Amino acid sequence: MKQIHKNLLCALSLAASLLTASAEGTFGKIAFMGDNVEINGSAIGWNATDPAVVEVNPATGKFEFTARFTRQRSLWQMYTDAIGENDWGTLKQSIYTPNMFVAFSDMDPEPEDIVINDGGVDCFNIKYLSEAVGQTVPVYHDPDGGFWVGGGSSLTTDKVFSFEISADLSEMKIVSVKDAEVNNDFPEYLYLLGDATPGGWELDKATRMENLGDGIYRYVGELKAGGAVQIYGENPAVCGLDAKAYGPADPGKIDRWGLSSGLNYYETGRPSGCYYTVEFTNNYIVTVDVANNNIRILFNNLFIVGQPTNWQFIQMEDEGNRVFTYKGYFKNNEVFCFAALSGDLGWSSQVAPGVPEGSTFGLAPYSDNSLTNGSAATMKSQYDSYYIVTADLNSSVLKTRTYNPNPVEKLYVACEGSYNEMAANADGTFVWFGDLNGNFSITPNTEAYPCYMPATEEVSIPSDGITNSEMVFNATAANNLNNRWSIGESGKYTVKVNPDEMTVSVQKGNTTGIEFIGADEENTSVIFYDLTGRKVQNPVKGIYIRVQGTTAQKVVI
């Protein structure tokens, strides 16, 4: 199987003789850190103690290496001092690349125009990039030193940018751009092996990842604490442990939040440290992108804990795509948060809104888009009720909505002290047509509470009515809320309620297509007739005429 690189390869060389650090001599090595960049075929990161180091080639007297920029924004810093040390102050002061605004503002700068920026803002020559590639290439400087190449969706091509450059600290010019062989033969599958995976170390039980296309593979499931994960581009049951492999040069760690890093490819000779260790047992989404050489692992489980759960960690319902819900009764001012893990470990993996005071919500639908891993904030409700609480971890959004915990079998339009039963439709909606005057609410029983009411305070029904207006479920009179729908002009109205969607529609006149005759007499028996006029003792699904006293109406069962 061939190594996959849907990209451009490049050779960059820096003249060692001109890379002078001080009057005492020349640099013997340079180092790189960055995002979405490969140096000599290996992805680099921001670990100052383990950067990508390039030494002078004694045969040529130059720094020689290859670099590749992915489609994503790629930040690259080149520095000369404190290599391998975690001394960011010294490191920052040794960033040596030409100044963007002087060296790279002119297609052919004169020597006297070159300014070396020691520890400042630096970047590639935008004009050279554009000329070599044949299109505009977004490039941005970074205030802390380094430069961004690419720009994601702003690019007009899906190519991976890389360039052949001759460079030193007095100039940096693109010599050419070389296209590598484009190979779209991505592996049919990737395989996970290790004692953290479901199949353990048994080769014939390696876990096959789902192929999502375009060189992207995914596994959704449990990874076990204390175990290891290896990634293979061939089935190890067939090809053995020397199969083509992906992973880090040294062991990577999957912590409580997961992992996001670059990915190395090994045709053969996978190093002994090419694996990931799992810190906590949990469900995860593992996504491997071999086209761009990166791996992303996200925790895929969520618990709710706090006063509403009696401080127990309750696993939330997995709705798919990292969206989790919990349904329960929340009292006024009861605090809670989410956690990636349960039990004692849960308190070190809290997930909550990023604002210090947390989020306070009422009966009305509520949204907060600041869910943050590690936040110590809490959330709480203003009113007693039943709530559906949703945490969307992909979008970092918290949502709340009230609901009726009991099966909705009957609904009544409560107006002026009377309770008018609504007709139940086969689609779960309820409809009623009759006289309305003043204020009204919707109740599941012939009692004032619990009830459905407007999501906001009193809502006045305009002459053209309301359609799919939000409503909420108020569980108790103790909330002291008097939200009601208000009829400005007395008359006959059609009221339609969708308890699943928590919406109500109110229109003037009869919009049901059903004829209503006379007044309902609650204490008389109900008789059903089919559409031919025959009495039906036990109606099943279908359309019938329902007669109670002097009232007849067409109903759907």
Image (cartoon, rainbow, N blue to C red):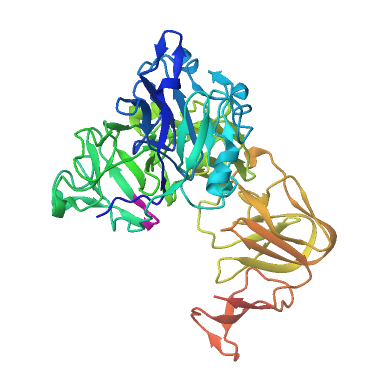
- Residue at point 57%, 45% (across, down): 131
Q: Nearer the viewer, residue 353 or 510?
A: 353
- Residue at point 43%, 32% (across, down): 310
Q: Is residue 22 left or right of residue 226?
A: right
Give the main secondary structure, helix, strand or loop, of the magenta stretch: strand
Name the quadrant containing residue 227.
top left
Provide residue 6's location: percent of width, then percent of height: 40, 52
Q: Is residue 411 visible?
A: yes
16 is higher (above) or lower (below) than 247? above
Q: Is residue 552 left or right of residue 72?
A: right
Q: Is residue 393 visible?
A: no
- Residue at point 70%, 74% (across, down): 512
Provide residue 62's location: percent of width, then percent of height: 37, 27
| Quadrant where the image shows the C terminus | bottom right
Provide residue 128's location: percent of width, then percent of height: 56, 39
Q: Nearer the viewer, residue 501 or 100?
A: 100
Task: Please provide the residue range marked out in magenta.
Answer: 212-218
